[in-house]
Image (cartoon, grey):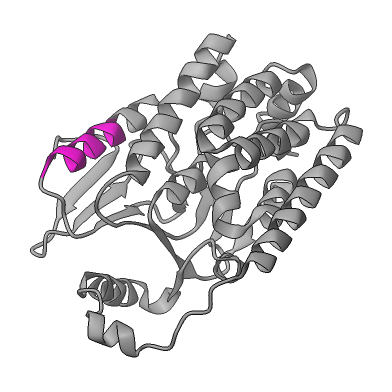
Amino acid sequence: MSPTQHLRVERSAQGIVTVTFDSAGRKVNVFEPHLLEELASVVTDLERGPPPPLVLFRSGKPSGFLAGADLHWIASLASQHEAQAMLRVGQELFGRIEALPMPTVAVIHGSCLGGGLEFALACSARIARDDEVTRLGLPETQLGLIPGWGGTQRLPRLVGLPTAVEMICTGAPVTAREARRLGLVEALLAAEKFEDELAADVRTRLQPPPTLSSAASAPPVRKSGLLTTAGQWLRDRWVLGQSLRREWRRRHDNPARLAAVRAIAAGWRGGVARGLAAEREEFCRVLFDPLCREKLKQFFQPKR
């Protein structure tokens, strides 16, 4: 692996690769150009080298996993062209992570927000520390923005359309336990035994898959029938319609919410590639909208 400033890359005796985010000179990990470049280099090494049995992504900061993209960087984008380029960098990189041939696990503690959660959604699994400070969410609409690195596409496919629309439109984060209930994370690790339980989880993931005979002896899995599938499709269509109408009426309060639902709808109706393109277009639209710009500006004002 190439040497990095903001990442630590280690390989265990079992071949497990651990990539630790540790943004130099910062109290929290945030995505900015240099960190993205280093991550892209690590991903290239993983794509080209012998595949490890497992890749863990975790944070070296006590404050949390990833706080998202650097908002100063986003606020400095001066044109649609610059914004589109920034969005493509993140979307394409996270797409490469999603396509890696080996299992990838985001090990989450503390804040996992915005671009940090979008990154975690690109991993094949997410596990979280079970405590009160661990929070997962996409708060972009509260800042007059929308998720721009695949969050509008991956979150609905993981937790379901109604839950994703609510999470993205409100911007409210969820606790680790709520994330587990929603299916956003697949396992919780006790805070007081975090490292021990992480090691046990890794050992479980390294075990070979069940043999055909043992799989055959397992109880059959009930598959959802056509009626259930049709019902879900009708429910999702209704949710999208209601959400689009609701956010259209509220567009003068926060245009970002309508933009987010439009991006979600584009992906639901036309597939992920079309959804990602819509996500870029809608992000750029609200980034330069005066009302949304004012919301972003308020974030930088001193808190009283």
- Specify the segment rendered in magenta: 38-49
- Where is residue 276, by image quadrant? top right
**Which residue is painted at 69% across and 60% down in the image?**
230
Is residue 48 highlighted in magenta? yes
Q: Position of residue 160 (x, y in %)?
A: 63, 57
Quadrant position of the C terminus in the picture:
top right
Q: Is residue 78 visible?
A: no
Residue 269 vertical placement versus 292 (above, below): below
Q: Position of residue 291 (x, y in %)?
A: 80, 22
Side of 41 where 34 appears, left or right: right
SS assignment for the magenta stretch, majority: helix
Q: Position of residue 88 (x, y in %)?
A: 45, 24
Decide which of 138, 249 is in the foreground and name it: 249
Taking the spot 19% from the left edge, 43% from the top edge, the residue there is: 46
- Residue at the limit of the structure toward the left, as seen here: 13
Given residues 115 and 67, the one toward you in this image is 115
Query: Which residue occupies 38% across, 55% down?
Result: 124
Q: Is residue 104 above or below residue 199?
A: above
Would residue 196 be found to the left or right of residue 258 on screen?
Answer: left
